[in-house]
Image: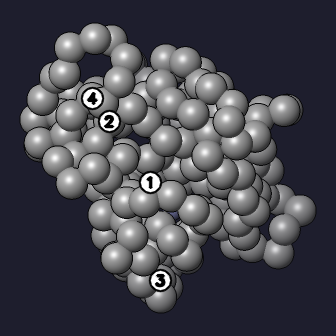
Amino acid sequence: MRFAERVAWWREGAERTGAHEGLDIRCYRTADGRRMSLGAGARVPVIYPGEVVAVVNDFLGRSVFVAHEIADGAGRRLHSVYGHVDPCPGLAPGSPLGDGGLVGTIADTSARRSPVPPHLHLSLALLAGSGRLGWPELRDPARALLVDPLPVVCGLRDSLHVSSLTRIRGEGAVDR
Ligand SMILES: [Zn+2]
């Protein structure tokens, strides 16, 4: 399910109560064209290096919020959110995640009374300020500017930098 869509992909004809805050990743195609599903237990790497800032419950598992060393001109910092996962043991606010570091695995939803199959929800958001962080803050337009994760997932992750974002620390030079 793509960013900002309103139709619920897991049940024909169903509508969400609001626009989708990210990208749901459920299926992929192999190099030889076979369609595969990501099942429970599939490993979820971080999309950029960063630091865990919150781990909260969601309706299918847990959600891990990661802050990155990338910000826009207004000082809003890029965050990524990995929803419906089982976080790696010991992962907590303050945990560093290196390039490709493991956030956790896709949660098994079979024991929950939900029609939604296991999948990864990925959100990207520019967030101002500090303080409590969770789904309500991510959905608050005064606090968060949501970004479509699809170009990043498709390997165009530097495309974020050309949209006036700046790497604020690490790796030396500022790149735009
Ligand atoms: Zn989702």
Name the residue beneath numbered marker 4.
167
Q: Nearer the viewer, mark 4 or mark 3?
A: 4
Find out whether the residues at labels 1 and 3 contact each other: C-beta distance under 8 Å: no
Q: CA distance from mark 2 to mark 4?
A: 4 Å
Residue 124 location (% of width, % of height) = 39, 51
Q: Which mark is residue 16?
A: 3
Disc with the residue nearer the chain's start (2 vs 4): 2
Q: Residue at x 66, y 51 (%)?
A: 54
Give, as a three-letter code, the residue at label 4.
Arg
Q: In what element is the residue under mark 1?
A: strand
Q: Quadrant of the N terminus?
A: bottom left
Disc with the residue nearer the chain's start (2 vs 1): 2
Q: Which mark is residue 123?
A: 1
Disc with the residue nearer the chain's start (1 vs 3): 3
Disc with the residue nearer the chain's start (1 vs 4): 1
Name the residue beneath numbered marker 2.
70
Find out whether the residues at labels 2 and 4 contact each other: C-beta distance under 8 Å: yes
Q: Residues within 10 Å of mark 1 (few under 14, many from 20)?
A: many
Residue 136 location (% of width, % of height) = 55, 76
Give, as a three-letter code, the residue at label 3.
Arg
Q: CA distance from mark 1 to mark 3?
A: 16 Å
Q: Nearer the viewer, residue 50 or 57?
A: 50
